[in-house]
Image: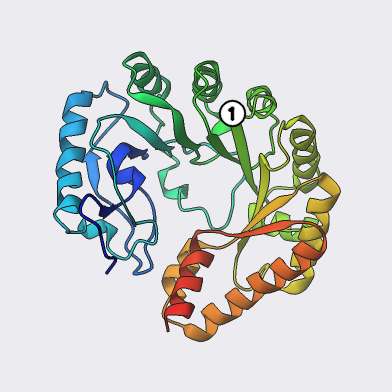
Amino acid sequence: MLHCEENEYISCNIIEHGFDAQISSINLCCRVSKDNITSKLVLFPNYRGERINWENFFQITSRLREIQKRGGIIEQCKGCIYLEKREWDSENYINSININNWIKCNANCIYCDRKEHKKEKEYRIYPLIKDLIEKRYLRNNSDITIAGGEPTITSDFDKTLKILIKNNIRPVRVLTNAIRYNRYIELGLKKSIVNILVSVDSGIKETYKKIKLTDKHKNVWKNIAKYVENQKEPTLVKTKYIMIPGINTNKNELNAYMERNVESGIKHTCIDLEISAYIRMSKNKEFLKKIYDLYIYSKMIGEQMGLEIEAFDRIKLIESKLLSE
């Protein structure tokens, strides 16, 4: 248990000032803890894009905040590695949003957990963001993530990104597969407002096709290189490699992936493990050690090539587990 000073308590920025816009609800967040708890703390159930009463919203989050202030931990947050001890403020505002309601995609990734929702229609997120901005609840120094399927092919994406750029709300992270090039992403990169994370998961064309079930490998790396050319800072465009046991968990694929990054001008890449594999195998120490060793290998090879390698969510959880034993 972390020791807290008089005015400190354990919490996180999402509990304090954020939310997760999911497919059919507004949730607290979508992170997975080291104990395999996925936050399902629903703030507004059956949500389809209706106007939100922000005073009601802040009443809910204030109650959650009080649990933390009293030294408790919200049940869904137990074991989360993102909890931290500090002196939090008590103002009502938003500076952390995860937009994860969109389910359209132009790929068909084998690890995607959204296929079961294909018949659902995404609700409009733009009016919600516009309302937050107009009421001055959304701070400029906000951490916005736009994800969920492939966001660039949804009807609201351009308008949403445009209003965030116009109001200088940053940083805005877009999780895109880069199959389709987007001019508003380019604009945001030029202004250092937007950063993107492209999950390519492969270095070899055949492996890409096996994972994404689409033959766009060459096109994706071409678009990545174009985004790199337009970024104002050298690490606004990052790539990601999600390890999928039995498909891309080998050194040859990792080597090819690192080479592709260098060729495209990438300076920073992230390594992760596919979420269902982590949940399924989280108690298998031998498996976790193998995955972590591949991460260490990729870090060594990448750094030799001038790449910064970041451990992403599940790799961080694995590292936490291995180091605590």
Q: How crowded is mark 1: few (under 14 residues within 10 Å), some or many (20 or more)?
A: many
Name, please, the residue furthest toward the front.
Answer: 6
Q: Quadrant of residue 196?
A: top right
Q: Quadrant of residue 84?
A: bottom left
Residue 164 appears in the rendering:
yes
Q: Residue at horizontal 53%, vertical 86%? A: 286
Q: Looking at this view, is 297 or 170 the one in front? A: 170
| Residue 45 image position (x, y, % from top left) | 22, 38
Residue 151 left/right relative to 143: right
Q: In which quarter of the image is the N terminus?
A: bottom left
| Image position of 186 with respect to 248: above or below | above
Name, please, the residue furthest toward the right.
Answer: 263
| Image position of 40 with respect to 103: above or below | below
| Residue 29 image position (x, y, % from top left) | 34, 47
Q: Quadrant of the C terminus?
A: bottom left
| Residue 246 image position (x, y, % from top left) | 63, 73
| Residue 167 image position (x, y, % from top left) | 49, 17
The residue identified by callout 1 is 193
Circle 1 — which element? loop
Residue 28 appears in the rendering:
no
Q: How many marks?
A: 1
The amino acid sitting under disc 1 is Ile
Residue 253 left/right relative to 169: right
Q: Quadrant of residue 83?
A: bottom left
Q: Which colour scheme is used?
A: rainbow
Residue 145 left/right relative to 267: left
| Image position of 106 with respect to 137: above or below | below
Q: Residue at horizontal 42%, vertical 69%? A: 279
